[in-house]
């Protein structure tokens, strides 16, 4: 146990490295799912945990659940990740809102959000990189009654 604990495990310094670790959790997913990748202060992977699984088009992110996971693993940083089953990796308004809410809440307990990643079959989008390069672009699902 002591030898394993002292060994350098996988380190995550980039969004691409986080994506490589998280991508397998979304392969073949038929519903939207949310995961959190927890890192220690040296960016060593502490674990990946499922936050929730929803329906075809939505999965609720409970801020308390994310905080419990991060605190139980003694994380210093985390990546939030979820998938879109629509094959469109572009963030929605709800994705941006969730990112802001989770980031703000966990900052209060000393856990920093590195990024929020969205996965579709062959693609991954970083909300942090999207915001830096193009601003807060989003899509809005059309709902019955939107045309009235």
Image (spheres, helix red, strand yellow):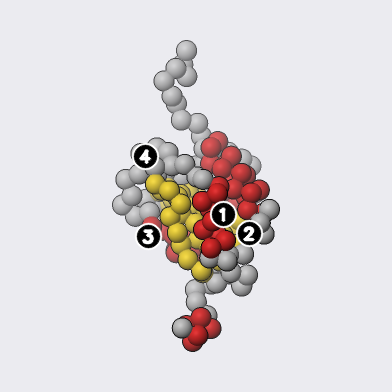
Where does the image place residue 68, in percent across and percent down from the top left? 54, 56
Ranked by sequence position, the earlier of labels 1 and 2 is 1
Please name which of the two marks, 4 or 1, marks the residue nearer to the observer: 1
Mark-to-mark CA distance, 4 and 3:
19 Å
Tell me: residue 40, above or below residue 146.
below
Looking at the image, is mark 1 or mark 2 nearer the viewer?
1
How far apart in space, not on screen, are marks 1 and 2 (Cα)? 8 Å
Crowd around label 1: few <14 · some 14–19 · many ≥20 (10 Å): some
> Which callout, 2 or 3, points at the residue further toward the start of the chain?
3
Q: Which residue is mark 4?
A: 55
| Residue 7 visible from this viewpoint | no
> What residue is disc 1 on?
67
Disc 1, disc 2: CB below 8 Å?
Answer: yes
The disc at residue 145 is none
Q: Is residue 21 toward the left or the right of residue 135 in the image? A: left
Q: Is residue 46 above or below residue 119?
A: below
Q: Earlier in the sequence, mark 4 or mark 2?
A: 4
Q: Secondary structure at mark 3?
A: helix
Report the disc number at residue 111: 2
Circles 3 and 1: CB atoms closer than 8 Å: no
Q: Which residue is mark 3?
A: 24
């Amino acid at each position: 146990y002591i030898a394993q604990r002292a060994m350098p495990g996988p380190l995550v310094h980039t969004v691409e490295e986080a994506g490589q670790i998280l991508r397998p959790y979304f392969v073949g997913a038929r519903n939207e799912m949310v995961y959190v990748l927890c890192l220690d202060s040296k960016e060593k992977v502490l674990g990946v945990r499922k936050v929730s699984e929803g329906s075809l088009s939505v999965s609720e992110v409970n801020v308390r659940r994310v905080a419990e996971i991060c605190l139980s693993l003694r994380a210093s940083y985390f990546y939030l990740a979820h998938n879109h089953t629509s094959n469109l990796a572009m963030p929605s308004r709800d994705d941006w809102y969730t990112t802001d809410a989770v980031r703000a809440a966990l900052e209060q307990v000393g856990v920093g959000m590195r990024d929020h990643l969205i996965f579709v079959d062959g693609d991954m989008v970083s909300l942090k990189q999207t915001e830096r390069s193009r601003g807060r672009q989003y899509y809005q699902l059309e709902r019955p009654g939107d045309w009235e």
